[in-house]
Image (tube, grey):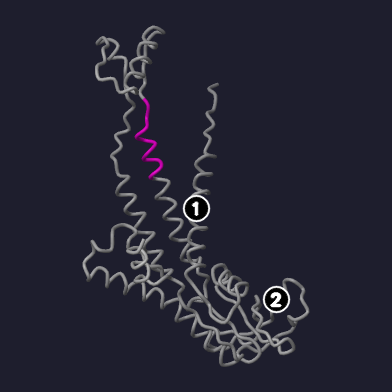
Amino acid sequence: MAKKIIYNEDNSILDRGIIRQSLVDKYFNLYMNNLKILDTDYQEENFIKRRFWWLGSVAVFKNKIINKKIFVDYSVSEYNIYDFPVKAQPINRKGVSFIPNELMEIDSQICLIFAQHNKKPICSIVYKYINEITEVEMVIRQQLKSHRIPFVMTGDELTKDKLKDFFNKINNDEGELYMTADELDSINALNLNTNFIVDKLDAYKKQLENELKEYLGINNLGTTEKKEHLINSEVESNDEVVNISRASIIDTLNIYFDNCNKVLGTNLKAVYNAPDEESEEEEGENA
């Protein structure tokens, strides 16, 4: 009975996992760095933005005893006719004394903040792009492998040694090479008839990355070509798309932050932490 061939796909699975996780880390860090929440310290801001990324929502209430706002996870027990929560209970994950274990009335004792209008986490859209970019990267790697298919040489031991010497001379960039017709006939190259499309795949990957950056409100000009090479209409069009994308997140957050400010007396506000482009240009000229 013929032996069954066992194919090892561990390397492919490992590569895909590494690529995907590196993209998750990259865009998570870009998101965290790009968004700024005023009236919070660095620990509060980090907690809030991580909750927006993974869960899409966070709750905040005011502890009157210590006169401090507290951001927490929560569970909802009741909804109104508009499908908005009415009562919520803070989740006391660390067992601290200043987080109550009781239902609190929303927009009176506690306020909820959602990262998006659909109440879903930021990563719900980011992961869709990351999965597509990962697959494109895997195809690019496979394309590169297909162009590294080796030569196959047949013959006896003497011919084998001659061919090894022949290819060593090629690798050493020798200009003149000599071999017999029979030796030349013993060389074959595996041909998969693979067209070179890495450049097209790379352009498609950059397009997906630019769309993802636009969603996160990150200006993507300069990622594929210099800004001065673009005409004014292209620059304005890009800026308009980025501003709309920024507004889809920032405006949503500030709707809920404004409500928190009215109910709890806070001064929460979401802004983008992106550096000013004019300042960057001035620094470049002075460098």
For the C terminus, give its image quadrant. Answer: bottom left
Q: Quadrant of residue 71?
A: bottom right
**Circle 2 crowding by C-alpha within 10 Å: few under 14, some 14–19, many from 20:** some
Is residue 10 one of those drawn in magenta?
no
Q: Earlier in the sequence, mark 2 or mark 1?
A: 1
In magenta, the rendered stretch is 140-150
For the N terminus, give its image quadrant. Answer: top right
> Callout 1: helix, strand or loop?
helix
> What amino acid type is highlighted by mark number 1?
Arg
Q: Are marks 2 and 1 in contact (CB under 8 Å)?
A: no
Between marks 2 and 1, how big is the CA–CA gap?
A: 31 Å
Residue picked out by circle 1? 20
Left or right side of 224 for 80: right
Is residue 147 one of those drawn in magenta?
yes
Image: 192 above or below 263 = above
Nearest the viewer among 283 and 11 is 283
Name the disc covering residue 91, or none.
2
Q: Position of residue 116 (x, y in %)?
A: 49, 76
Left or right side of 169 for 262: right
> What amino acid type is highlighted by mark number 2?
Ile
Q: Position of residue 83 (x, y in %)?
A: 55, 84
